[in-house]
Amino acid sequence: MKQSIRQRALLRLLYASACLALCMVLPFLTGQIPQIGSMLSPMHIPVFLAGFLCGPWWAVAVGVTAPLLRYLWLGMPPLLTAVAMSFELAAYGLVSGVLYAKLPRRNGSIYAALLSAMVLGRIVWGAAMVVISGVSKTAFTWASFLAGAFTNAVPGIIVHILLIPVLVMALRRAGLIRG
């Protein structure tokens, strides 16, 4: 059955809402130990999924909103971290959504979109941290960037690379994502 434009828009809104809700809930799984939460980056998973499910613009909305809403609701992550994360997650959603829409519908394209989004999102996070550190008069060095974006994030990177493509392929097989 062919969906109308209005039905597709409503479906994307519902998917984006579900992804935003997951952004609020998933960090509770690691919330008791903040170091594990920052390593696994549970809030990133729904934003990547939003890029694949809803397209780039809804995913950007989820990415920008999630850390700031969580800060307003629970006080975590800290405000400056939430601001930098908003830029990072918006980039994840934008890049994964755009590339998934443009690349051929093959499983390798899911990995290409995901890995590209991960790299570009971390660069955006680094740029946001440079600006924030300049405004807040704190140090943000190249070593801080490498540690925050890659070294300390290896467990989360592995989880994302293993989990997200499998979820996207399952959602495609279930008919929830066109493919």
Image: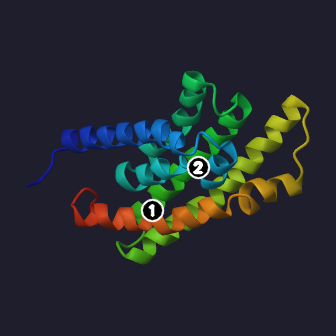
Amino acid identity at mark 1: Ile
Direction from residue 72 to residue 17 in the image, left or right: left
Direction from residue 101 to residue 125 in the image, left or right: right
Q: Is residue 123 above or below residue 135?
A: below
- Asked which quadrant contains residue 16, the reply is top left
Q: Percent from the top left, x then y, of residue 164?
A: 45, 62
Q: How is the image coloured?
A: rainbow
At horizontal 58% and vertical 49% (from top left) the residue drawn is: 91
Neighbor class of circle 1 (other Cα within 10 Å; few <14, some 14-19, many 20+) is: some
Q: Which mark is residue 176?
A: none
Q: Which residue is mark 2?
A: 91
Direction from residue 50 to residue 169 in the image, left or right: left
Amino acid identity at mark 2: Ala
Q: Is residue 137 above or below residue 102?
A: above
Q: Percent from the top left, x then y, of residue 156?
A: 60, 59
Q: Is residue 110 above or below residue 10?
A: below
Quadrant housing the C terminus: bottom left
Direction from residue 101 to residue 77 in the image, left or right: right
Q: Which residue is mark 1?
A: 164
At horizontal 65% and vertical 43% (from top left) the residue drawn is: 33
SS type, badge 1: helix
Instruction: Find the distance from the CA under tag 1 to the CA under tag 2.
Output: 16 Å
Q: Percent from the top left, x then y, of residue 75?
A: 63, 25
